[in-house]
Amino acid sequence: MSLKRSLIMLLLIAGFSQQAMAQSADAGIATTENQIRDRWRHSVMLTYMYGSGGSSSDSTSRDLTYKSLLLSGEVSIFGGTSIWGALPLNQQDGPLGSVSGIGDLMLIVNQKLFGISSVEVSLGLGARFATATVNEDRLPQSYQSGLGSTDILIEGDVISKNINFGMGYQLAGKRSINSITRLKRGDELMFRGGYTYRGDLFDIGGEFIAIKPLQESSVLNPISQGAEFVNIPESDDFQVDLLLKARYHFSELFGLTGTISVPLSKRNTNVDGLTRVFAASFGLSLDL
């Protein structure tokens, strides 16, 4: 397949995703395996991501757009152990203003447990660290570059050459110190499964990602004078996204990647800044 045709296919996928008017969540544990990549190899990736929050029932979070430049990488050690990390530079724009800055650092240690034929079973343990400031310009949490808490991430994966299944748990940390909302998110369960066609020069795949918050989020009561917190209705809604992804191999070392999130369910709240009506990313990867 020619480079020109491959790039056209990536652009067509991107155009399709912008017609999807529902919701996609960027929960930490759902971001670790979104790109098509070869596991257990040294790699570096630079990715640009764009998303729109659309309209929300939360008046402080309407019509937000999100831009990120994400530097990520993986180091493989001992053959069956790898350390994956990512640090974003984020910008959030909305009617109340614009905020930009370093986001939350993510680190995951993956351990291959065993393999049967071409099927591998692995376990990952890591964290999303609260490295971003959350009180920039005295704007609500949804405008901030980070979530304001350190979360523990656990994931298990069953992966073959073409098929993958995974399950994860995100243990939400303490309440954010954002002065407007003091957001406390609930823990989350994540399930994913998909198929990837792998060609000589071009890989393309898709998977479903389902996320279920186990508790409603809570924030400061806006009409109370004290430190009284109230739950956000429907903030624990079950959500399902279809993720389309592709990679073009320039060579054994370099690749062009792209992802599109096509939401299949809708969440009406965006107090945490994670809701998307669509999301897309493009990146360059170096695999050693």
Image: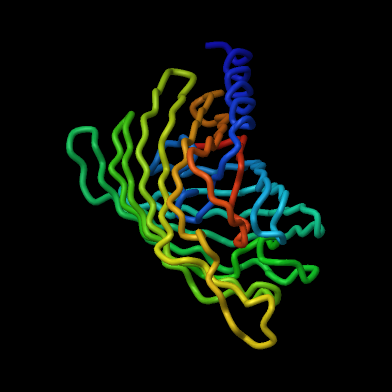
Q: Position of residue 229 (x, y in %)?
A: 57, 79
* Colour scheme in use: rainbow
Q: Position of residue 88 (x, y in %)?
A: 63, 54
Q: Is residue 134 left or right of residue 199?
A: right
Q: Residue at x 60, y 46 (%)?
A: 276
Q: Residue at x 59, y 51 (%)?
A: 275
The residue sitting at the bottom extreme is 226
Q: Position of residue 257 (x, y in %)?
A: 56, 32
Q: Residue at x 68, y 54 (%)?
A: 89
Q: Is residue 158 left or right of residue 228?
A: left
Q: Is residue 111 left or right of residue 239?
A: left
Instruction: Determine whether 25 is above or below 223 in the image.
Output: above
Q: Quadrant of residue 176?
A: bottom right
Query: In front here: 88 or 214?
Result: 214
- How many numbered marks does the figure carry? 0
Query: In front here: 164 or 235?
Result: 235
Q: Position of residue 234 (x, y in %)?
A: 50, 59
Query: In front here: 75 or 136?
Result: 136
Instruction: Determine whether 68 is above or below 141 in the image.
Output: above
Instruction: Determine whether 163 is above or below 271 in the image.
Output: above
Q: Is residue 177 left or right of residue 196?
A: right
Q: Residue at x 58, y 69 (%)?
A: 130
The residue sitting at the left extreme is 116
